[in-house]
């Protein structure tokens, strides 16, 4: 069992749900990324999803795309990200999972990416542009190394296919709340609760819901059917403008602001 498996096992036994923050690696720099991740862990987020910047993301909305562009403009690389994670020593370091394009994984090499990520302390990967039907090779490597391959189910995924995806996933299943791209939304689509509740009856795998979650009301509505709620654009938007030249105090203030926001979401969990 991986640390992610153990964590969700404990949470289920305690009837506890998680808020899982998404942050872009290297926006505005890797030092800020790690400081923010540690702060969110202290606030009660034991898992942090780390976006690996990519020039052509397929499912990310304008807020996250802009953060990737900022990071790439500063020449953030995958080796630099993994090296920073590997050398980062902190008592409150969260469990990281990467959101990474398959183009990056393929370029590095499937086995080498998983091995490098594990050496850096990463627990798993979400690969949004890898169709489940083509994931067998990577899934086999992940199973062999006890590295979680977290796959996605969308509102348009046929139900029989959703079950098959769940059977080949590990760690948790990422349920995309809406058809489309990431981004904050004022309301969530009808049928979401019913669809997730249906899937929960057909897989023992934890289900975490992402895309569009940004308010305590969203958390209160979705927590009854979810093991975790993934919050991305609402956090990344608050990082924008916090560049490396801002100085220590403004950066600390921004980290505290984001921590307070995530704390409000955690407080809305049952």
Image (cartoon, rainbow, N blue to C red):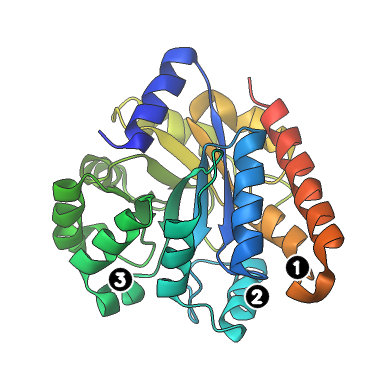
Front residue (pair 176, 233): 233
Q: Residue at x 56, y 81 (%)?
A: 72
Say whether residue 131 is visible.
Answer: no
Identify the image quadrant of residue 183: bottom right
Q: Residue at x 39, y 70 (%)?
A: 101
Q: Residue at x 73, y 35 (%)?
A: 263
Determine which residue is flagged by label 2: 66
Instruction: Where is residue 180? Give x, y as percent.
Output: 53, 62
Q: CA distance from mark 2 to mark 1?
A: 9 Å
Contact? badges 2 and 1 (CB < 8 Å):
yes
Determine which residue is flagged by label 1: 240
Disc 2 is placed on an element classified as helix
- Pointer 2 or 1: first along the chain: 2
Mark 1: give few (<14), some (14-19) or many (20+) Cα within 10 Å.
Answer: some
Vertical side of 196 occupied by 122: above or below: below
Say whether residue 210 is visible.
Answer: yes
Instruction: Where is residue 254? Give x, y as percent.
Output: 80, 55
> On the rendered structure, is 125 left or right of 111?
right
Disc 3 is placed on an element classified as helix
Disc 1 is placed on an element classified as loop
Count all numbered tags in the image, as a single digit: 3
Vertical side of 15 occupied by 164: above or below: below
């Amino acid at each position: 069992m991986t640390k992610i498996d153990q964590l969700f096992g404990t949470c289920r036994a305690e009837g506890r749900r998680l808020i899982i923050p998404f942050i872009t690696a290297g926006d505005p720099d890797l030092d800020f990324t790690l400081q923010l991740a540690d702060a969110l862990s202290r606030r009660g987020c034991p898992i942090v999803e780390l976006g690996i910047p990519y020039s052509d993301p397929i499912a990310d909305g304008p807020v996250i795309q802009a953060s990737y562009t900022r990071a790439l403009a500063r020449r953030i690389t995958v080796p630099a990200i993994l090296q920073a994670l590997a050398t980062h020593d902190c008592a409150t370091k969260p469990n990281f999972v990467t959101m990474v394009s398959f183009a990056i994984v393929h370029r590095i090499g499937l086995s080498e990416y998983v091995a490098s990520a594990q050496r850096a302390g990463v627990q798993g990967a979400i690969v949004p542009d890898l169709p489940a039907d083509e994931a067998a090779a990577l899934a086999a490597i992940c199973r062999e190394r006890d590295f979680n391959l977290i796959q996605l189910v969308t509102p348009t995924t046929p139900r029989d296919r959703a079950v098959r995806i769940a059977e080949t996933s590990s760690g948790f299943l990422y349920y995309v709340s809406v058809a489309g791209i990431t981004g904050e939304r004022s309301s969530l689509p009808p049928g979401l609760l019913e669809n997730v509740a249906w899937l929960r009856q057909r897989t023992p795998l934890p289900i975490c819901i992402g895309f569009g979650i940004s308010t305590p009301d969203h958390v209160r509505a979705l927590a009854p059917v979810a093991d975790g709620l993934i919050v991305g654009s609402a956090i990344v938007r608050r990082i924008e403008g916090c560049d490396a030249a801002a100085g220590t105090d403004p950066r600390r203030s921004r980290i505290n602001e984001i921590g307070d926001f995530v704390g409000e979401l955690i407080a809305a969990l049952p």
